[in-house]
Image (spheres, grey):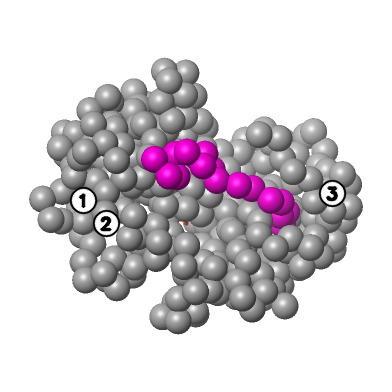
Amino acid sequence: MPIEESKVIWMDGKLVPWHEANVHVLTHGLHYGSGVFEGIRAYKTPQGSAVFRLRDHVDRLYASAHIFLMEIPYPKETIAEAIRAVVRENDLEECYIRPIVFMGYGEMGLNPLACKSSVAVAAWPWGTYLGEEGMAKGIRLKVSSWVRHNPNSLPPAAKGTGMYMNSSLAKVEAVKAGYDEAILLSPQGYVSECTGENLFVVRKGRVITPPTSAGALEGITQSSVVALAADLGYTVEADNLLRSDLYTADEIFLCGTAAEVTPATSVDDRVVGDGKPGSFTKAIQQGYFAAVHGQSDKHRDWLDYVG
Ligand code: PPE
């Protein structure tokens, strides 16, 4: 789906018209993937638009930059305000927000620190990531032949732009084979995550999500799901899962800012449960959408109003 353009983008300290937020073709980040980014959503609530878990996303952006020794030349509050500003100034009630920090134009060669970093924050309307039908009825997953990078090759705690070549290989393979999304295994053979989502498995009364040591990103939606599961009386375990645990799961769902909470109904053509989104998955979906839309008193602190 083509990007639905909005009016302005925050770039290096100011709001510029959408089509003027450009970079030089010799930008370091374009050649070597030297950048870090976030994916955030803002939702409509009875009190106006609110950014979901803004502080946590800003903190993770700075943590990603820290891992790569990249400097973000602004205090966190400036980036938080830039995020609110792109929602407000583009008159977007609900949108996806993409902050990116990347090494700019200046020098070539593998040492990115010789270049200056640039920061941009864009926002645009972005509907259901894995399709309305997938959200309602569940999606078909395929375990990828591509393995999630070793944490000592690329640190999964960082959301580095170049790291996503691994996810793209897996996504293209799955889509070309007729599936909706891929699951990557760790180099040790444990279930890691999907190309842009964390995974949850319900099996024999346990709710399990793979640990960061299996190469999964420390997802903000994942941590929201852990809290929502606790509201339902379930304790989520971070534990290693085998490929066969997926085949014999009672329920599987994916979660992420873009994908929100999406049920999965088969893995490698093995039907999960009864082939329909399960009751736990549906309860989490409901709790998630209530929270993001400001309909949950308990989780109001997850919302940051745009004003
Ligand atoms: N794992 C990966 C690899 C990942 O990229 C994401 C977010 C998650 C897990 C879930 O993290 P969180 O959003 O904090 O719950 N993926 C972002 C990028 C998607 C894209 O297509 O680009 C997102 O969901 O915004």
Identify the residue position indicated by label 1 in the image.
202
Identify the residue position indicated by label 2 in the image.
280
Mark 2 or mark 3: name the one nearer the start of the chain: 3
Report, in whole angstroms, how far the alpha carbon at label 2 lies from the one at label 3. Answer: 41 Å
Report, in whole angstroms, how far the alpha carbon at label 2 lies from the one at label 1. Answer: 8 Å
Element carrying mark 1: strand
Task: Out of 77 and 193, give the one closest to the viewer.
Answer: 193
Task: Please report the bounds of the magenta region as a residue range.
Answer: 121-137
Looking at the image, residue 79 sits to the left or right of residue 259; the answer is right
The type of residue carrying mark 1 is Val
**Quarter that holds the N terminus:** top right
Which image quadrant for residue 162?
A: top right
Q: Is mark 1 within 8 Å of ligand 1?
A: no
Q: Is residue 188 visible?
A: no
The type of residue carrying mark 2 is Phe
Task: Out of 37 and 281, give the one closest to the viewer.
Answer: 281
The mark closer to the camera, 2 or 3, is: 2
